[in-house]
Image (cartoon, helix red, strand yellow):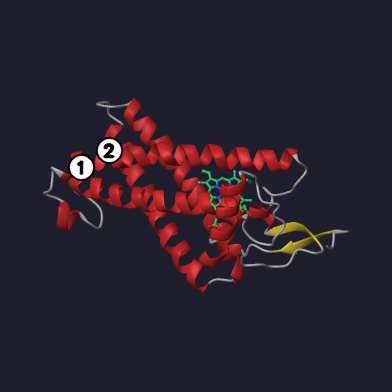
Amino acid sequence: MSHPTTIQARRVYDPLLRLLHWAIALSIVALIVTSQLADWFEHGPYEKTLWNLHIVIGYTLTAGLLTRLLWGLVGPLSARWRDLWHPAVWKESLRTLRLPATHRAGHDPLASLAYLFAYGVMALMVVTGLGLAASEFQTGPLAGWLGDAAWLEDVLKEPHEFGFSLLLGFIGLHLAALVFHQWRGERVAQSMVTGKQYLGTESGVRHD
Ligand code: HEM
């Protein structure tokens, strides 16, 4: 078995992937802030403006997610959906209840499961959000179709709020994992800024 002797910086995450990460992360933070402020100012003069802002930022998230979906199909290897798909590692971690020793270039295999889950929840938020914009505020791309469906508001509100809680959980876990790596001396967090990963010389780009 070979052991890594030196740590090398490698360019792994491309600029568009990083731009999308930050566009999506900032949209989510802004969506959280505007929804909480709108609730806070309920029945006040700013409530409608805040929901309008929330809806417009929701379009940014929608555009970011659609672009990420496409980039996962046509982008470089480390941006592909394949780079987030590691069922063998997930099964092994579940069987042994241990964190895998991962030093591969690209996404962390176990974290990838959380990313796929988060993307699924974001898709739910976009669909229910566009439905709410149409049925409650008669605006957005679905307004022509669902603008009169006032009943839809009650159907969509709960899954939208449930998705919100799941996303808060994901953000807490994601940030805690990044702090944990930093504490262990692993320079993971900077990789979504610089695109570089610091890996042992034995680590290649694997797609397991
Ligand atoms: C609202 C806050 C955030 C959200 C919703 C979020 C979401 C995500 C998602 C969905 C991915 C997968 C990216 C992909 O599709 O390739 C990811 C990866 C990543 N994020 Fe975040 N992120 C947030 C904040 C941050 C912050 C503050 C940092 C640290 C500077 C960070 C650093 C990273 C890194 C380094 C990865 C890749 C880790 C790996 O190699 O597996 N994120 N994040």
Q: Amino acid at mark 1?
A: Val
Along the line of sight, the residue nearer the viewer: 183 or 89: 89
Q: Which mark is residue 155?
A: 1
Residue in the image at 42% along x and 40% along y: 166
C-alpha gap between disc 1 and disc 2: 7 Å
Q: Residues within 10 Å of mark 1 (few under 14, many from 20)?
A: few
Along the line of sight, the residue nearer the viewer: 205 or 73: 205
Residue sitting farthest toward the right = 5
Residue in the image at 45% along x and 47% along y: 27
Residue in the image at 44% along x and 53% along y: 119
Along the line of sight, the residue nearer the viewer: 83 or 21: 83
Q: Which residue is the site of mark 2?
A: 158
Rendered image quadrant of residue 108: bottom right
Residue 80 visible in the current orientation: no
Residue sitting farthest toward the bottom = 74
Q: Measured from the top left, where is residue 165 in percent x and y?
A: 41, 36
